[in-house]
Image: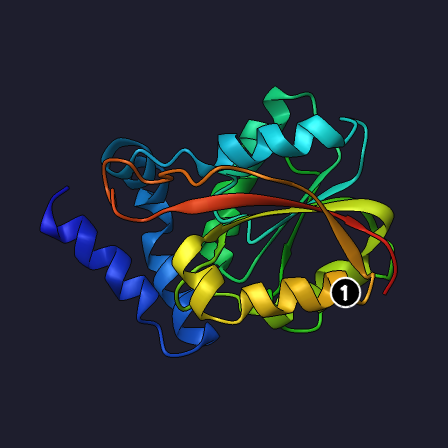
Amino acid sequence: MNNKNEDRVQWVYSSKNNSELSQRYDEWAKDYDKDLSEVFGWIAPKTASAYLAKYVHPDSIVLDAGAGTGLVGLALAEHGFQNLTAMDLSEGMLREARDKNVYGKLDQMVLGEPLSYATDSFDAVISVGVMTLGHAGPDSFKELLRITKPQGYIVFTIRTDVYLKNGFKEKQEEMESKKLWEVVDVSEEFHPLPTGEPDVLHQVWVYRVLNY
């Protein structure tokens, strides 16, 4: 990977707030798909989508939380999903997602802040590449839980170091102990960016919503 692309990722990670993060993604949006596929070898969308498809019927209403340019939507479409909503903080990324023609709705919102969706809006939520450095924190689970129907699924990828060091492990276990959700599946650790960031490891987590 060349220094320009490595610098761009660190530049995004180092955003001081959601406004700056949104602006930086707006600037990256046009080159994002090319960079992620050709330079980084980004496989997390397909990996996580396969886990969702294992537990969720393709007729289900699914939110792609932190959809970016829609790579997860494309991967879900390959599994037959059609009732997809994209949500992202970046208007530029959502424009790219719209061009994929796999989402029925696209909404600009911020994961980690109150979401304007009604309670029990979705059969499932998927969030890929958002639980990472400088992005959504563990408090974002509260709203994802609220908008997912009881017995629905929340599927997400998370960096293993972020899981251990940034409060996710404690929050996930707390929500499980309160019987808000139950863990259904956890992937082995894998390299989501094998050519771009070979030292970074992620896991896919699958939860079933119980109460809120």
**Can you see residue 102?**
no
Q: Nearer the viewer, residue 48 or 63?
A: 48
Of the 4 image quadrants, the one containing the N terminus is top left
Question: Helix, strand or loop at disc 1?
Answer: helix
* Farthest-out residue, front: 177
* Farthest-out residue, bottom: 16
Residue 38 lies, in percent from the top left, at 26, 31
177 versus 93 height, above or below: below
113 versus 208 height, above or below: below
Q: Nearer the viewer, residue 184 or 76?
A: 184
Q: Nearer the viewer, residue 74 or 140?
A: 140
Three-letter amino acid code at the position of disc 1: Ser
Q: Residue at x 55, y 36 (%)?
A: 48
Look at mark 1 in the image and give the residue it sits on. Answer: 177
Please rate how many residues cluster around mark 1, counting C-alpha atoms within 10 Å: few if below 14, some from 14 to 19, many from 20: few
* Farthest-out residue, left: 3
For residue 176, side relative to residue 93 (left or right): right
**Can you see residue 194?**
yes
